[in-house]
Amino acid sequence: MSRILVVDDKEENLYLLRALLAGHGHQVILAQNGAEALSLANEESPDLVISDILMPVMDGFSLCRRWKGADSALRNVPFVFYTATYTEPKDEQFALGLGADRFIVKPAEPAEFLQLITTILEEHDEGNLRGGDRSPEPEAQYLREYNQVLIHKLEDKLVQLEAANRTLVEKDAFHRAVLDAMATLVAVVDEDGRVVAVNRAWRDFDRAGRQPCSELVGLRVGASVLEALERDRAVMPEAGGLPSAVLEILRGERSDLEVELPHDEPRRWFLVRIEHVGAAGAAAVIACSDVTERRRAAEATKEASRRKDEFLAMLGHELRNPLAPIRNASFVLRRTHPGDARTARATEIIDRQVSHLARIVEDLLEVSHRARDAAGRARDDRLERRRPRDRRGPSRRLRARGARADGRVARCPGVGARRPHPPGPGRRDSARQRAEVHGPRRPNHRPPRRRRNSAHQQPHRR
């Protein structure tokens, strides 16, 4: 088992090399710069050192020169450069001139990298490595070559940075053009909840001459989103929990939020979506879309559905009225011609079709009743949500009657309970049969009192 010192300033590179080398039986020691590597090597000499070049405190070139110095005790320890920054032939020539035994460019295939490390260790054991036998260059020559390498590398880095900056500027212009072309109102908010950037639709949103119900839509740069939502909460029930939810998004405790808010009179509705981004200088993005037409279409659809249910109910009642006279006429026809086969056949067909039509009418009425019950339950739920809840619980009188904690009165056994229906057809079936035979039941009314004949009236007393 060989003891290998790995020097790199990036944690991910140290982790990968340690996992690769330790998985093949090597003992791995980690250092993040050249000074730390020299300190560890002086305490206990390694069998091999693998070093990056571009590092803080002491780079790889300086480490190699100190490592391969004439008076260094580590002179005969193999030194391997493993770099992704200095990759040109001049860099490799300079590194080998400092006494390095190998120059490997990142990234290398794991199998090839391990084979190179094994070869270097075997050559060191056999005494075939000549890196430590090279005499060090004079200080002036070393500094001149070192400066040339650094200047060349800095020039390359400057060219890359300029290209990267141009790319970023182009991407930023492209993103701004895309955002400005969108009809959706978009704003960027910082960690304090203040608007730092908006798109063209947000900037052009005209608040003059309106009676805004939501202060959030159309905020200017520098305004506070949290303060606007606090003002909205005072006038809109829809914005009740928005300030706390937006604060959670700004802190990163919540990913997104979506809510519909009214804006002005006549009512316009905006779908507000707030999403956490966590980028530099930005904490969330607010997107507001005008969904007024969608809400109006939904309300029109709901109104059409309500009218349809009313029409079905009216149609069911209107169709049920002629059924009883038709069935009565069939009954009279059958009694009038008791022995006629054709009459019996015709009345049988009439009765069967009337029964079938009666079932269809009952189904129509059932559909209308269920739709009306569903609409009533939805309306009750909306009223219940809007009704302020009393946190004090039931009153003393209700508690005396057995009220629960939620304010409902518990029903005592046997009190107020409905008696079960007797076995047999239910009320609706019996009512339907009675309506089919006798027609719709007329409302109960008292007959008018008959006036006495004038001849039998008592004479008026004066």
Image: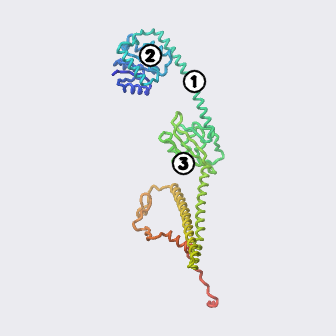
Location of residue 134 by image quarter: top left
Residue 90 spot, x, y in % from top left: 50, 15
Q: Secondary structure at mark 1?
A: helix
Nearest the camera: 433 or 79? 433
Residue at horizontal 59 percent and vertical 63 percent from the top: 312
Classify residue 460 as left or right of residue 150.
right
Amino acid type for the residue under numbered disc 1 = Glu
Location of residue 113 by image quarter: top left
Cα gap from disc 2 to disc 3, whole angstroms: 63 Å
Residue 178 spot, x, y in % from top left: 61, 36
Residue 316: mark in rendering: none
Q: Which residue is mark 3?
A: 239
Q: Secondary structure at mark 3?
A: helix
Give the foreground label among 1 and 3.
Answer: 1
Nearest the camera: 193 or 280? 280
Quarter occupied by the N terminus:
top left
Q: Which residue is mark 1?
A: 162
Q: Which residue is mark 2?
A: 62
When the figure is inspected, residue 408 is found, relative to residue 167, above or below; the finding is: below
Residue 18 spot, x, y in % from top left: 39, 26
Nearest the camera: 139 or 102? 102
Location of residue 391 by image quarter: bottom left
Of label 2 and label 3, which has the lower sequence position? 2
Residue 415 spot, x, y in % from top left: 41, 68
Amino acid type for the residue under numbered disc 2 = Ser
